[in-house]
Image (spheres, grey):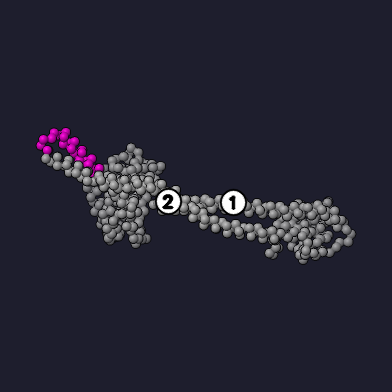
Amino acid sequence: MFNKVKTRLTMIYTLSLVCLLISFIALLYVIISYEIIDKNVEELKAYLNKEKEDLVEELYEDDHHDLDYEPNRTVFYYIYNQSGELVYGEETKPSLNQWIEKNINLSKREQVKRLEWGKEHLLVMNASLDQHGFVILGMDITAERHLIQRITLILIVLTLLFCGIFALLGHYLAGQAIKPIKLAFDKQEKFVSDASHELRTPLSIFYSSVDLLTREEKDRLSPFGHEVLEDVKTEARLMNKLVEDLLFLARSDKNYLNLDLKKVNLSELFNSIGKRFLRLRAEGIQLIENIQQGVYFTCDETRIQQLVYILLDNAFRYTKEGKVTLTLTLEAGQIRFIIEDTGCGIAAEKLPFIFDRFYRGDETREKGGAGLGLSIAQSIVNAHGGKISATSRLGQGTAFTVIFTEKQEPAA
């Protein structure tokens, strides 16, 4: 149990820190990318402000020049007249202007756009010169993009590294966090086990003494005395059952349940239990059996019988009138049995707690017992590698469903 809690705490702690780290990395990536691009845009604007007069002169030159090719330039530009015709330009890559004209809106001014040309990254800006023309400026930002990619790769590697560190740290911290809880649980478990063992002998002696007194002094006791002794015997039996239940749960917690495993015909077992409950059923309650024949399961027959008794007893106890249905089926390798009643039902907010020890519902469901029956039922199911669940509607009834896998080995 504590290993599961420790694993869950480790996962929660690790995932929380990883999500925080990923968020930080994503934010850092966005900030770095923005700052680098903003710096490049400022460089283009600074170049435009510095060279604007020369660029305007080129716009009004009578003899248009061919494009100059200068691969070592930092900034390339193309000057266009108002009609969108190329007047002049200096480029760093042959035929780049034709590709840019296809990928940028020439009519849109103050446009800044990032473009990918093959394996290279470009930053392009469209700006007005005056009412008669405009210029497209750009620069190669491949180095900056590669820098961002390297930073991203480093951050990813760091993320993976810190994930491992967080997992180890989370495992350690989770272990430290549950230490006092485990210590308290172990003390409580030892107390329950020791107290149960110590109470068995005096309770047996107490019950035997009362029984002997009833038999030896029956002629001398008044009717009221007989009634008192019978009440004492009843309470002693209830106390003895409570002690046995506590011992069972204590063994279950420590995985000390010794199961006598053998191949059991569940169909015959369920039929037998059903007949016994038919004789004991209250007036106005009908027992309906839907039992598939030939269902076998490797299990502890006594414990499975105890499980069915607990669930059927609950169903009859909380059903004043109506019906209780016992269903057993084998389908697709799964043994499923359902015990459903038409009783008072359980409120939705209380349903998740019904398997807790000593949990008692409202007054409507307090029909005796110590609140350990469903905890024992769950322990039996878990010991056999199965699952138990409950569905209920207040005032309409409750259904308990138990599922076993036919070929699964039970847990000892």
Q: Above or below — where is 288 with respect to 69?
A: above
Q: Callout 1, which amino acid?
A: Phe
Binning the other alpha carbons within 10 Å of mark 2 as few (below 14), some (14 to 19) or many (20 upward) gives: few
State the residue in front, 115 or 85. 115
How far apart marks 2 and 1 lie (CA) works out to 28 Å
> x%, y% of residue 30?
64, 52
> x%, y% of residue 202?
22, 43
Q: Callout 2, which amino acid?
A: Val
Q: In this view, does 390 lie to the left or right of 131?
A: left
Picture disc at residue 260: none
In this picture, which residue range is highlighted in magenta? Answer: 217-241
Is 226 a magenta residue? yes
Task: Give the residue displayed 28% in from the left and 45% down from the top.
Answer: 195
> x%, y% of residue 373?
30, 46
- Give the mark, 2 or 1, whose residue is nearer the N terminus: 2
Task: Give the residue displayed 26% in from the left and 54% down from the top.
Answer: 302
Task: Give the residue displayed 32% in from the left and 40% down from the top.
Answer: 365
* Residue that lies at the very extreme toward the bottom in this rendered image: 94
Badge 1 is on which residue?
24
Task: Give the residue displayed 33% in from the left and 52% down from the top.
Answer: 254
Q: In which quarter of the image is the C terminus?
A: bottom left
Badge 2 is on which residue?
5
